[in-house]
């Protein structure tokens, strides 16, 4: 068996997997052409093939582009992602969320197909994405607008009464409290110990907002305070310590699942990344590049890495399962050594 046949990308070529298009290319020494993985041409002998991570590398091999699969053109997946990116820009630019039918018409898809593709790429429905954009505009506008009502309408809400029905879920507090810059939020927290060192768990009324790992318990408490500077932090709660024990059990055996509600807070982009991370099964790893492709922004690998670094829910949002394309573990907010131990532990589950 050749070295190429040992490479996991060989399977994609054999299956002519369209999902692999745009992620790598291959060239054939005997014909001096290069192709995308899904090329329908007759499969060449593995020992006559070379794999390339970029199309520039494929061109540099001296081969010419295949006329059948046209590797220089954008892949169907990339074209589809470009449509979704355009839809996101249309949603972000509108004063009010466009209807599903209007969005689908503007990017040339049927409403049902557009809905499915948008959610598969972004992890959110068009309505959820629009709601995240509007709530973001409202947060920015509340402190500047003359009144709360002015901010509500400026953000694109057509009815203040309908907005107030769901304001607490959108903002985590009342608009007036946010406008005053004094969120009346109480977070319970406790610090315990696990095989990875110290662990801090904090919760709002909705669910767990933070799972932090480290060596210094005091530093974890300061980290929590920095993340929620206006919150009223409540510690020394014996009843809450039982919840921490549940989280510790999950950290020790992630495969069993946490079974507790999470209060996930982040930008629309961060939530897209985190939703994709939660789909990675225990015992598996993926790359920052793969996550960027999965959420429809293949050029935003660095932004994906930053979103992983902003994650405050260690293990529950498994950013430790994301590695570099070369297999290196790269950075981890709570230390590369912990990342390595988590990955190795999950492989043995």
Image (cartoon, grey):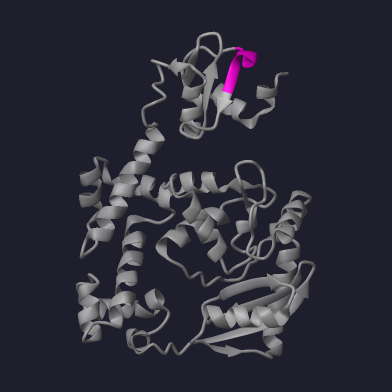
**Residue 192 falls in which quadrant of the image?**
bottom right
Looking at the rendered structure, the number of numbered marks drawn on it comes to 0
Quadrant in which residue 176 is drawn: bottom left
Q: Residue 293: percent from the left, percent from the top?
A: 47, 44
Looking at the picture, how far across and down is residue 125, in whole percent? 37, 56
Q: Is residue 38 among the parts visible in the rendering?
A: no
Question: Which residue is depicted at the point 65% across and 23% down?
Answer: 4
From the viewer's perspective, is residue 116 above or below residue 195?
above
Q: Nearer the viewer, residue 196 or 236?
A: 196
Bounds of the magenta segment: 45-50
With respect to residue 210, does 133 lie above or below? Answer: above
Task: From this view, report whether residue 345 is shown above or below residue 178.
Answer: above
Taking depth in this image into account, of 108 and 338 the one nearest to the observer is 338
The answer to whether residue 31 shows anywhere in this view is: yes
Q: Determine whether, in the image, residue 94 is placed left or right of residue 222.
A: left
Vertical order, 324 against 31 (above or below) = below
Q: Residue at x 30, y 68 (%)?
A: 134
- Name the quarter where the N terminus is drawn: top right
In this orientation, which residue lies closer to the viewer: 215 or 92? 215
């Amino acid at each position: 068996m050749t070295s190429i046949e040992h490479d996991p990308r060989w399977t994609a070529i054999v299956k002519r997997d369209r999902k692999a298009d745009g992620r790598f290319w291959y060239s054939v020494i005997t014909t001096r052409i290069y192709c995308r993985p899904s090329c329908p041409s007759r499969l060449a002998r593995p020992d006559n093939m070379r794999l390339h991570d970029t199309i520039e590398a494929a061109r540099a091999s001296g081969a010419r582009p295949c006329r059948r699969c046209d590797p220089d053109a954008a892949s169907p997946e990339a074209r589809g992602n470009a449509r979704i990116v355009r839809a996101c820009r249309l949603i972000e630019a509108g004063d009010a969320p466009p209807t599903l039918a209007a969005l689908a018409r503007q990017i040339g898809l049927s409403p049902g197909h557009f809905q499915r593709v948008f959610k598969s790429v972004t992890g959110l429905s068009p309505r959820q994405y629009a709601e995240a954009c509007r709530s973001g505009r409202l947060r920015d506008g509340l402190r500047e607008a003359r009144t709360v009502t002015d901010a509500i309408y400026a953000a694109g809400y057509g009815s203040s009464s309908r907005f107030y029905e769901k304001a607490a879920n959108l903002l985590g507090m009342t608009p007036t409290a946010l406008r005053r810059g004094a969120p009346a939020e109480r977070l319970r927290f406790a610090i315990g110990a696990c095989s990875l060192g110290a662990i801090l768990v904090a919760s709002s009324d909705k669910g767990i907002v933070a799972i932090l790992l480290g060596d210094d318990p005091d530093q974890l408490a300061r980290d929590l305070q920095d993340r929620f500077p206006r919150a009223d932090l409540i510690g020394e709660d014996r009843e809450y310590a039982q919840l921490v024990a549940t989280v510790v059990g999950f950290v020790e055996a992630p495969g069993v699942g946490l079974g507790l509600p999470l209060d996930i807070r982040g930008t629309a982009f961060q939530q897209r990344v985190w939703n994709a991370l939660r789909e990675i099964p225990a015992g598996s790893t993926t790359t920052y590049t793969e996550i960027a492709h999965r959420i429809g922004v293949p050029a935003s690998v660095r932004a994906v890495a930053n979103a992983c670094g902003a994650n405050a829910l260690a293990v529950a949002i498994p950013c430790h399962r994301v590695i570099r394309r070369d297999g290196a573990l790269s950075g981890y907010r709570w230390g590369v050594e912990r990342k390595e131990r988590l990955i190795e532990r999950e492989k043995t589950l």
